[in-house]
Structures are given as C-alpha cells and as structure tokens.
Image (spheres, rainbow, N blue to C red):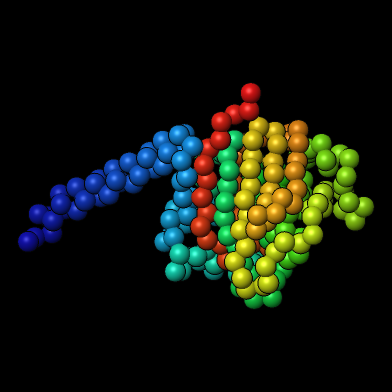
C-alpha cells in the first residue's frame, strides 16, 4: 500500500482516537456530577494533569514518572502537578508512600489560576509525621488559622490528633472532604484536621515535588452535594 493511500487511514485513526478520548472525559464528568467515584489518575500516564516547574529549562519527565500504576516523584526540583480541571464540593481519596528517606510533600487544595511555587491554595501537609497539618499559601485563610496558627510559622495549623501515619515505605491513605467552605482531612481513617470558613472553595488539585522521593496511586474523587 502506498503512502498516499495510507494517509486517509491514518487521519481517520487519529480522529477516532481523539473522539474516544473526548467521550471518556465526558463520561468521567457525568459520573462526577452524579456523585460517582472517578479516577483522576489512569495508572498509565499523567493525562489530565498539568506539570509545573518554575525553571523553564527543567524537564518535568525527570521529576514525575508513571510506572506500574504509580506516580513516582523524585522531589527535585520543587514544583507540582495539578489537575487540568477545577473542582469544588468533593471527596478526594489518594494513597502515598515515601520511596526513600521520608521528607516533605503535600496535597494542594483549591489551587488558583497562577502557576508558581507555591500557588495560592490550602495545603494538606504530607511531611513525615505531620500529615494532616494545614498550611495557608498565597493569602488564603480560614477560621482555625486565624485562631490557632503555630508560633513556629504563622501559616501552619497543626493536626489535632497523634500521628496516624504508617511506617516509611508503607502506603498511607488521605481522605479529604471539601464541602462548601469547610475542609476535613483523615489520615488512615483518623480525623486529623478541619478548616472552616475557607476563603477559597474551589480550584485545581495539586501534588507537590518538595525535596524527597514520594509515590502516589489510587487518586479518585466524587462530587458532593453543596451544603444548603
């Protein structure tokens, strides 16, 4: 078969694949609207995620990799990946573990539009033995922060319960509820923190690269009915 004869077939295949991807994303959107669980990570690629590193010459592929159904992050340089869609009123579940010596990372909630390190958001901390802390970033705020910010850093609101993380190298689960202007975070089933009257209530969801190798998997979300 000549190259000229193959061109229409190749073009048709490209259109077919594109339509299939559009239909998959549409199905996911409809599922989320119904309150059904949708996967934010397909286990094969970073489709649906935007990678950001402040150095335009840095190669994101050297920081974020996908293998065997797991997102692998080297921790360097500092940066993050975020969803390409904004969310509000949702339950988010994900698993993480430290790939080497435990260090620092976080889940960025209600990320606003300007990509920078670090973007305006509320961070659910993942630093070893501090998972469940909140950090306000870029001028965000909430009721507990105004009352209970730690003396060491006035952007931090420490977790409420004893550490419920597993040993380094074992998988942990974050269960995060964002309902209206309230955020609740559970670490391995233990309620660790609550934030009320948050000044941001929707945005992108981000995962930090912040100095230590970390892995993520089973990232899923379901929409919640807005509080009345």
Question: Residue at 27% across / 49% down in the picture?
Answer: 17
* Left or right: 94 as drawn, with respect to 69: right
Residue furthest to the bottom in view is: 100
- Residue 24 position, x and y percent, is 35, 44
Q: Is residue 107 above or below residue 225?
A: below
Question: Residue at 33% across / 41% down in the picture?
Answer: 23
Q: Is residue 73 above or below residue 149?
A: below
Residue furthest to the front in view is: 189
Q: Is residue 223 above or below residue 69?
A: above
Q: Is residue 140 above or below residue 2?
A: above
- Residue 129 position, x and y percent, is 76, 64
The quadrant of the rendering that contains the C terminus is top right
* Left or right: 19 as drawn, with respect to 165: left
Pick the front one: 168 or 211: 168
Question: Residue at 56% across / 31% down in the picture?
Answer: 225
Pick the front one: 49 or 179: 179
* Left or right: 57 as drawn, with respect to 160: left
- Residue 9 position, x and y percent, is 15, 52
Question: Image quadrant of residue 179?
Answer: top right
Pick the front one: 213 or 88: 88
Please give the count of numbered marks on the rendered protein.
Answer: 0
Residue furthest to the left in view is: 1
The quadrant of the rendering that contains the N terminus is bottom left
Question: Residue at 61% across / 58% down in the picture?
Answer: 173
- Residue 78 position, x and y percent, is 67, 61
Decide if residue 59 is in sight here.
Answer: no
Residue furthest to the right in view is: 151
Pick the front one: 78 or 170: 170
Decide if residue 131 is in sight here.
Answer: yes
């Amino acid at each position: 078969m000549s190259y000229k004869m193959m061109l229409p077939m190749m073009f048709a295949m490209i259109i077919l694949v594109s339509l299939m991807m559009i239909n998959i994303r549409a199905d996911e959107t409809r599922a989320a609207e119904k309150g059904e669980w949708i996967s934010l990570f397909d286990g094969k690629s970073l489709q649906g995620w935007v990678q950001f590193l402040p150095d335009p010459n840095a190669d994101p592929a050297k920081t974020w990799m996908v293998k065997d159904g797991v997102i692998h992050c080297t921790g360097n340089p500092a940066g993050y990946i975020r969803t390409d869609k904004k969310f509000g009123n949702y339950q988010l579940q994900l698993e993480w573990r430290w790939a080497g010596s435990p260090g620092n990372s976080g889940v960025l909630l209600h990320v606003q539009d300007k990509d920078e390190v670090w973007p305006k958001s509320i961070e659910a901390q993942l630093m070893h033995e501090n998972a469940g802390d909140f950090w306000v970033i870029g001028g965000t705020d909430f009721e507990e922060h105004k009352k209970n910010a730690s003396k060491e850093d006035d952007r931090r609101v420490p977790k409420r319960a004893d550490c419920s993380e597993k040993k380094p190298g074992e998988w942990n689960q974050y269960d995060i509820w964002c309902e209206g202007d309230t955020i609740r975070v559970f670490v391995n089933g233990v309620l660790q923190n609550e934030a009320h009257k948050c000044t941001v209530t929707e945005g992108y969801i981000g995962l930090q690269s912040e100095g230590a190798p970390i892995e993520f998997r089973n990232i899923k979300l379901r929409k919640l009915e807005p509080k009345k």
